[in-house]
Image (tube, helix red, strand yellow):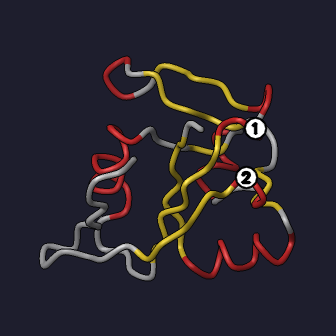
């Protein structure tokens, strides 16, 4: 099993679970795909784009269930990032957990599998 990660505010993920799919955040919808990160990319993504936010969840997504909707594309510094084109079925989530926030407002993800 291979995992990729999505940082998301709790109410948005709870709504997605009720609906069975996550269709994207405002940034995802504007860009035309759902942004994800690999384990080695997730903490920098959290620092850059989620600092100062609270009530966040980290959702681990199993890549096996994503099929052709998952594409690895160059982004920050040429690194390949996972992007999903289309809705994200919440059934592909292996787990989710609350994200603690450091004193400086940065989300703390810890070690990821």
Could you tell me which quadrant the N terminus lies in? top right
- Quickly name the residue at label 1: 66
Identify which residue is drawn at 57% across, 64% down. 95
Judge from the rendering whether residue 17 lies leftward or rightward of residue 80; answer left or right.
right
Position in image of residue 13 (x %, y %): 65, 72
How dense is the environment of label 2, judged by Cα within 10 Å: few (below 14), some, or many (20 and up)?
some
Q: Which residue is more in the foreground, 101 or 33?
A: 101
Which disc number belongs to residue 104?
none
Q: Is residue 28 above or below residue 26?
A: above
Extreme front residue here?
A: 1
Identify which residue is drawn at 61% across, 50% down. 61
Position in image of residue 23 (x %, y %): 77, 56
Identify which residue is drawn at 37% across, 55% down. 49
Do the residues bearing badges 2 and 1 touch, measured as CB atoms within 8 Å? Answer: yes
Judge from the rendering whether residue 2 lies leftward or rightward of residue 112; answer left or right.
right
Query: What is the CA distance from the residue labelled 2 to the residue labelled 1?
Result: 7 Å
Position in image of residue 111 (x %, y %): 28, 53
Judge from the rendering whether residue 70 lies leftward or rightward of residue 77; answer left or right.
right
Upstream in sequence: badge 2 or badge 1: 1
Q: Which residue is more in the foreground, 111 or 75?
A: 111
**Quadrant of the rendered structure where residue 32 is?**
top right
Identify which residue is drawn at 75% across, 60% down. 90
- Quickly name the residue at label 2: 92
Position in image of residue 43 (x %, y %): 29, 51
* SS for dot 1: loop
Extreme left residue here?
A: 103
Q: Is residue 61 above or below residue 41?
A: below
Q: Is residue 50 above or below residue 34?
A: below
How dense is the environment of label 1, judged by Cα within 10 Å: few (below 14), some, or many (20 and up)?
some
* SS for dot 2: helix
């Amino acid at each position: 099993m291979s995992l990729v990660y999505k940082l998301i505010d709790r109410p948005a993920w709870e709504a997605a679970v009720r609906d069975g799919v996550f269709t994207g955040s405002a940034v995802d919808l504007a860009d035309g795909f759902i942004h994800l990160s690999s384990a080695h990319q997730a903490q920098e993504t959290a620092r850059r784009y989620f600092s100062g936010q609270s009530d966040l969840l980290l959702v681990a997504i199993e890549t096996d269930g994503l099929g052709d909707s998952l594409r690895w594309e160059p982004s920050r510094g040429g690194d390949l990032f996972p992007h999903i084109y289309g809705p994200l079925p919440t059934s592909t989530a292996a787990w989710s957990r609350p994200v603690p926030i450091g004193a400086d407002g940065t989300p703390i993800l810890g070690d990821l599998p």
